Amino acid sequence: MNNTEQVKLSLKKRYAREKRFQWYGKIAVWIGFVFLATLLLDITLKALPAFQKTEIQLQVPIDWETLGLQPDTRIDPESLRTVDFGGVLKKSLREVFPDVKKRKDKKLLYRLISSGAEYQLRDLILSEPELIQQGKISLWVTADDDVDTFYKLKKSTSRIKPKQAEMIQQLMDQGKIRTRFNDTFFQNSDSREPEQAGIRGALVGSFWTLLVTLVISLPIGIGAAVYLEEFAPKNKLTDIIEVNINNLAAVPSIVFGLLGLAVFINFFGMPRSAPLVGGIVLSLMTLPTIIISARAAIKSVPPSIKEAALGLGASHMQTVFHHVLPLAMPGILTGAIIGMAQALGETAPLLMIGMVAFIVDVPGGILDSATVLPVQIYLWADSPERAFTALTAAAILVLLAFLVTMNAIAIYLRKQFERRW
Amino acid sequence: MTASVLILLIIGLSILAFLAGRFRAARAQKNGRLKALPKHYGYYTAIWSGLPALILLVAWSALKPVYIHEQIREVLPQSVLTQSNASVDLYMNDILLAIQNNDTRDDPVLIRAVDRYQQLQQESNWILTVLVVLLGLSGIVYAMTNSLLRTQARSHTETVIRVALFICSGVAIVTTIGIVLSVLFESLRFFQSVNFFDFVFGTKWSPQIAIRADQAGSSGAFGAVPLFFGTLLISAIALLIAVPVGLFSAIYLSEYASQRFRATAKPALEILAGIPTVVYGFFAALTVAPFIRDLGQSIGLDVSSESALAAGVVMGVMIIPFVSSLSDDVITAVPQAMRDGSLGLGATRSETIKQVIIPAALPGIVGGVLLAASRAIGETMIVVMAAGLSANLTANPLEAVTTVTVQIVTLLTGDQEFDSPKTLAAFALGLMLFVTTLVLNVFALHIVRKYREQYE
């Protein structure tokens, strides 16, 4: 048997191995896709229930007598403070179920509606005082989260007593229970009750934090990039700065949190939980990303443009600020948006500086206590109540929507303004 | 509040200075040529007006609290002063609280202190405002009279800008120094109460310090070995997923895939790197971990619901793009001539890849894997949400383990006193984390860079 024959014999095996190897590659790529698809699908499916809320229809008596007010009292927050709206709602609940008599059953009955329903009624009367003249109104009040879960899944959970299930069935038969778009989720801030919890506070907190981050990191990032690309002399110090920036980009984000805690909060005595500190920490974290991309953008401006400007008598500084920077701006902004997206999704360093507090108010500025969207997700994911799972997933979808938008803008900028010189 | 008013004041004065300088230069320009454009004289005057005032403002704000603190000490009774420093700090806090709530509790000492504090604050604000305005105005006057038209206004301005740019790039260094110092200082304080070797080699971790000294385990145990081991276990699982998947997809995408498939598949895989880690944490804790537990139970295995496996697998998915995009870079950097040579000798494509391209790209791939490993070690949210809190020293991936980052988060969230070994331990762990990832990064970047030079 000569060599050619030997090779020919082994060919079949080698081609089989070639095929197999290609398949490994294909499988690897598809594993990545499958993971991505599973992740997104799983979260979307979990989130869907959170975009609907369950409401129960009640006939609420709101004449002066039931409210316990003198007729024609001026309706304002002060005069309504003494009114027992919870009692009013309980009364109308009893009217729907006249045969519920036992004390224990009544308790179960009252638990059908959200504890926030009384504020719903109060706000309604505050905004439309003339309703009192009607004496009785038909009102859809938010149901309790357990009822909500039960109604959406149409099957029993351990948190719904058989008696309550009967009541809900009765409501269903009478058409007095329905689901609507959950606007509470976008209008309210955090709450212990899942049916009253929303992401508004976290969104506003994220906005303030990102604002601080942008205001700090963009000018400093551009300044550093301009210096390193255009003015830095070739020496040891410049080398150190460059190596430093590269290493800083790979420092775990939680270490920046430690820095924030030790330096800004304990040493400088800045307020805990404030977007100011969060923004500073995040800007230190995103600075390397912005510097690196800004340098790449500045570097890609062709030297001929610089030489032309210098040749016409512009100073180096004028060349940079009048010609190089404007031409590099789309690239710099792309990098900045990607850095901001990174900052928007960051959680760990913010846990260190106390942005994990339970905050009900919408923060009004960079010094107020606040939380941000990813931290809100973390807090809700930790909650034992089942209904919070859907809220968490829904908050994640909102976060991902923001990230997709930011990245889409970045890609658009790059496509629109990218120039091949 | 006053600081922002003062900053606005400084900006206003600078604008005024700019207008004045430009106006004067513009008028002079009609009579003859100047050394620079009128606006440069404007900038020059504005810098003289604004910069000193700004520096004063910053320095004043930094020194004011110290000075006020010293002054307040004098009004405090001897009984407070003779106690430790901490009690004075506490008293300062009381003063601030009293001002905030407008409630002095009818305590004569407190009333005196509050009065003194408010008086000092007011004085300080007045003096500062006057000084800032004076400095701003005198800056204008100096710049205008100091033979404005004969100065090299543009080059002076540019020098200032250049210094400002240098300071910007110095922020990165300051940040690093800040990280090192803050972590190092707190760690040193920690090692004063806990032996360094007990920390690094101890195998028992239970940082909860009992309130009473006679309680069991009152001192707390700070042996970090279980944490290091847990971190390594989870990172190893992550790399076991990420390295094969990442490497093979990089090979497929760069060597086999059509241009069109590559153009969509590569960004799609990179989405995995853009998803926030808290999302992965949620996915790991609520989907993957129960799934693995149920799977284990169905074949008769006892799997913890916070198993290292779940956290590791999800973390592996997260770092797939790191491995694949870095490997992709180095694989495409291998010169085409080497491929052609191998194929010309009759090797199949897979043989070329296995015997020529991978060996040539190996240093770069190793660098990429090391970067991914450092990413895995420092990753926080996935393990905080999906891994456990109990420090088990086990190599069984089905049991719950804890990691360095999880412990840092648990030790530092919630109420804390800053001086207890418990909180300081978090900084010692942070130091370990920082050093480990730094060494890994420097090493990885070194390998990658050295390799790149080979073919350039």
Image (cartoon, rainbow, N blue to C red):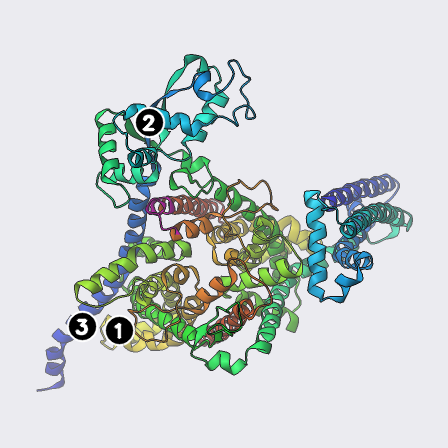
Chain holding disc 1: B
Q: Secondary structure at mark 2?
A: helix
Q: Is residue A221 left or right of residue A159?
A: right
User: Is-magenta flag for residue B140?
Assistant: no
- The residues bearing labels 3 and 2 have C-alpha atoms spaced at a distance of 73 Å
Nearer to us of marks 3 and 2 is: 2
Q: Position of residue B419 (x, y in %)?
A: 60, 67
Question: Which residue occupies the foreground of this view, A105 or A41?
Answer: A105
Magenta residues (range): A383-392
Q: Position of residue B88 (x, y in %)?
A: 72, 61
- At a point 22% along the width and 76% down the height, the residue shown is B346
Residue highlighted by disc 3:
A17
Q: Which mark is residue B323?
A: none
Amino acid under disc 3:
Arg
**The image quarter in which residue B335 lies:** bottom left
Label 3: few (<14), some or many (≥20) within 10 Å?
some
Nearer to us of marks 1 and 2 is: 2
A39, above or below B12, in the image: below
Amino acid under disc 1:
Leu
Question: Which residue occupies the foreground of this view, B244 or B205?
Answer: B205
Amino acid under disc 2:
Leu
Q: Is residue A32 left or right of residue A296?
A: left
Confirm whether circles 3 and 2 share one chain. yes
Residue highlighted by disc 1:
B343
- At a point 58% along the width and 60% down the height, the residue shown is A261
- The residues bearing labels 1 and 2 have C-alpha atoms spaced at a distance of 82 Å
- At a point 71% along the width and 65% down the height, the residue shown is B85
